[in-house]
Image: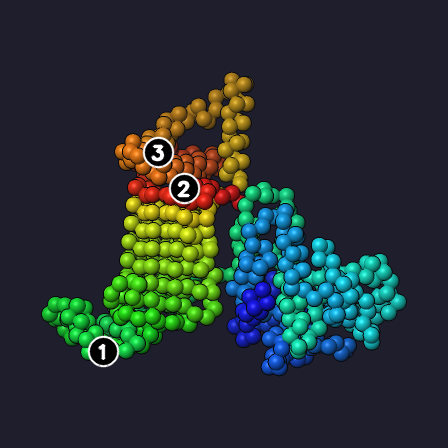
Amino acid sequence: MADGLLGGVGLGSQAMIPQPECTGWAVEEEPAPLEKGLFQDEDSCSDCSNHDKPGSSLPSFVPSGKTHFPEIFQTSQLLFYERFKAYQDYILADCKASEVREFTAEFLEKVLEPSGWRAVWHTNVFEVLVEVTDVDFAALKAAVRLADPYLCESQVSSFTLECMNELLNLKEHRLPLQELWVVFDDSGVFDQTALAIEHVRFFYQNIWRSWDEEEEDEYDYFVRCVEPRLRLYVFGYQKNSNIQAKGIRPNGQKVMHVVSSTMMTGLLRSLLRDRLCQEPCKEETEIQFHSDPLSAINACYEGDTVIVCPGHYMVHGTFAIADSIELEGYGLPDDIVIEKRGKGDTFVDCTGVDIKISGIKFIQHDAVEGILIIHRGKTTLENCVLQCETTGVTVRTSAEFLMKNSDLYGAKGAGIEIYPGSKCTLSDNEIHHCKEGILIKDFLDEHYDIPKISMVNNVIHNNEGYGVVLVKPTIFSDLQENVQDEIEENRALKIPTSEEAGTAERVDLEELIQCATGKMELYARSSLSEQVEGNCEIVNELVAASTQKGQMKKKRLSELGITQADDNLMSQEMFVSIVGNQFKWNGKGSFGTFLF
């Protein structure tokens, strides 16, 4: 536990994060820049140091002001990854909203020193030095007494020692842990205490909402609430990539990059025969040699090709691919392994117009964003192996992803996340041993476009949750219930309903579903009915959701007095094709919906 919590503490400037709320020692008109910590700004920190002393691995700072407080642990500059891992793996795990306090208390009981440490009690009015004598883990509070000598910094001059004693008596000398900032100790004994309190403070200031316990308590609280809020409130986290394409080389030439840790004569002859001189070239081609794939990727321009020879390559950066290039392994995927080490958000980040990746095994470590993200453009992945640790592949809005004959496994989130307005084609793949197989993001909002999804002959098995999950807002289900209530009420009053007036539209929907699932009838008659049922279920649900989206839009336009001709659903391009997939041994079944 200790190693897991402390192992990811970043001390460099890139590790600093902005705070959404002003909780520093001094009030500033402008938000702190990215390099500043929670209490670390120009006016509020007279000294900030990173101690290289044996024992403590955390930095410290001295709060500014007239009162000479002791050094405080600086715990605010944690990476997104570090906070993510702490909440997911150590604090909240798979708890429900109603279990958050219980799980938090259990976590604190394991890592927090129950007494013997000092802290600065920090409020908007004053800071005062206290000593902790006991901890009530269930209440997330500490029993304290004023430290000797008495040290207090207050914005109110009349706030005397007597006033402070009276205030503590009113509070029964019990203070919320999140209001305490642990005094630095270079022995390392209180590092865990400082970090644990930081995680609790950050959670209740930026993530927890008072209404969370009132919501439906069926789903994983971390997945449903913590991760999206962590991205939004912690960082104003931007997922869109800012990678700039280089374009065509100034001389107009394309280069072939060969990656090999060592180049032997036999390997070179094989490359010349199989890849470098396959057919007579009309013009000479430049060949560049690299010892690692990352340097080859960084050297690429539009139209270049990277050939990775057999070997196990360790990389410590992100593959940022902004130009249309080909990255291919020379051999079998298991013989060409690219493994990411070091912390970071992404492994392979694609924004190029047409990127092709083939014949490589990727192994991911310590990333949050996932093993592969397609922000825009088209990325084709063929005959690859993706060994994930967090999310697998993310297909962002307006991006296109084609995955063929590949193997994806190990994602703690979804194996593949499909965003609205994207295009995703999956053919002859295996997606297994993930938390969820494929997650289709909510596309019901009027600003979102419907994703185009094709899944043919994939095997989706042994995932912890569903094979495929569709994310929908709770209001969608409420709307369906309200429509049904309205129908029943109008029938009782003998008022024609939009349901009755739209019989033709309803028939169109039935025809569309029948058309979309027609290819499944042959399978349904076979002995594979259990496996193939999931195909029909997914198609039905996606088509129904799409139709509901159209009806919601039409209703809004009607309320504004805008009439719109009925859409002929059969004339629209089919946005979903799901045929011949096998769903086996998924924990919750082949398909499910996730309401938020």
Q: Give above or below for 521 relative to 97.
A: above
User: In the rendered structure, which amino acid carries the disc numbered 3?
Assistant: Ile
**Circle 2 is placed at which residue position?**
590
Sequence-wise, the earlier of marks 2 and 3 is 3
- Which numbered marker is on residue 513? 3
Q: Picture coordinates of residue 419 (x, y %)?
A: 42, 51
Q: Picture coordinates of residue 92 (x, y %)?
A: 59, 55
**Circle 1 is placed at which residue position?**
264
Quadrant the N terminus occupies: bottom right
Describe the element under mark 2 as helix, strand or loop: strand
Q: At 86% from the left edge and 69% from the top edge, which residue is drawn?
A: 160
Q: Residue furthest bottom?
A: 53
Q: CA distance from mark 2 to mark 3?
A: 18 Å
Q: Picture coordinates of residue 379 (x, y %)?
A: 32, 58
Describe the element under mark 3 as helix, strand or loop: helix
Instruction: Tell me the quarter of the picture where residue 347 sits.
Output: bottom left
Q: Picture coordinates of residue 110 (x, y %)?
A: 65, 61
Q: Residues within 10 Å of mark 1 (few under 14, many from 20)?
A: few
